Amino acid sequence: MNNKNIKMGQRLEVKGITPAQADVEVTFNVGQCLEKAETFDPSYTFKPLDLCKIKGSNVTGGVGPFGLITLATPDLEEYTPVFFRVFKDTSTDKPKVLMCSDARPYVP
């Protein structure tokens, strides 16, 4: 699959592969959206992993979350979101990208 434009909240199923193992290469283009990124506060007293848990895959930020949902069980009962959040890092003037994941029951 190439050049798929996926809108916010849209899901695209990859068909024709077995769920046992799949190598996936994905490129996300957020373009001008980086201007909308939330500021990453360097005074956060928690670790990036904690920030992933606090924000989760359902809390909309300036840029993100966006990513993949991988099915973890053949009966579609559990899935694992692998998602990204982009922040403005005011100490470096470069984007700070967090890659997060969490397992949860599948809710279509």
Image (tube, rainbow, N blue to C red):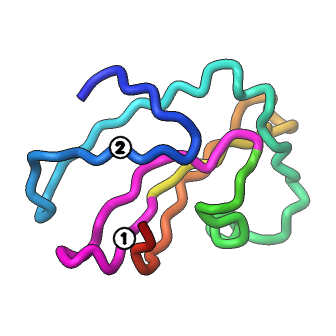
**Secondary element at image label 2:** loop
Looking at the image, residue 77 sits to the left or right of residue 20; the answer is: right
Above or below, comparing residue 14 to residue 45 in the picture: above
Which is nearer the eye, 45 or 36?
36
Secondary structure character of the magenta stretch overall: strand
* Residue under the image location 41 percent in, 30 percent down: 27
* Residue under the image location 44 percent in, 75 percent down: 103
Looking at the image, residue 16 sits to the left or right of residue 60; the answer is: left
Q: Which residue is mark 2?
A: 12
Q: Quadrant of residue 75?
A: bottom left
**Secondary element at image label 1:** strand
* Residue under the image location 48 percent in, 44 percent down: 10
Q: Quadrant of residue 73?
A: bottom left
Quarter of the rendering occupied by the C terminus = bottom left
Closest to the camera, between mark 2 and mark 1, is: 2
Is 50 a magenta residue?
no
Looking at the picture, how far across and down is residue 25, in whole percent?
29, 37
Residue stretch in magenta: 62-81
Looking at the picture, how far across and down is residue 22, in whole percent?
17, 52
Looking at the image, residue 99 sits to the left or right of residue 37; the answer is: left
Is 75 a magenta residue?
yes
Above or below, comparing residue 82 to residue 50 in the picture: above
Q: Quadrant of residue 12?
A: top left
Q: What mark, if any, has residue 79 been given in the picture?
A: 1
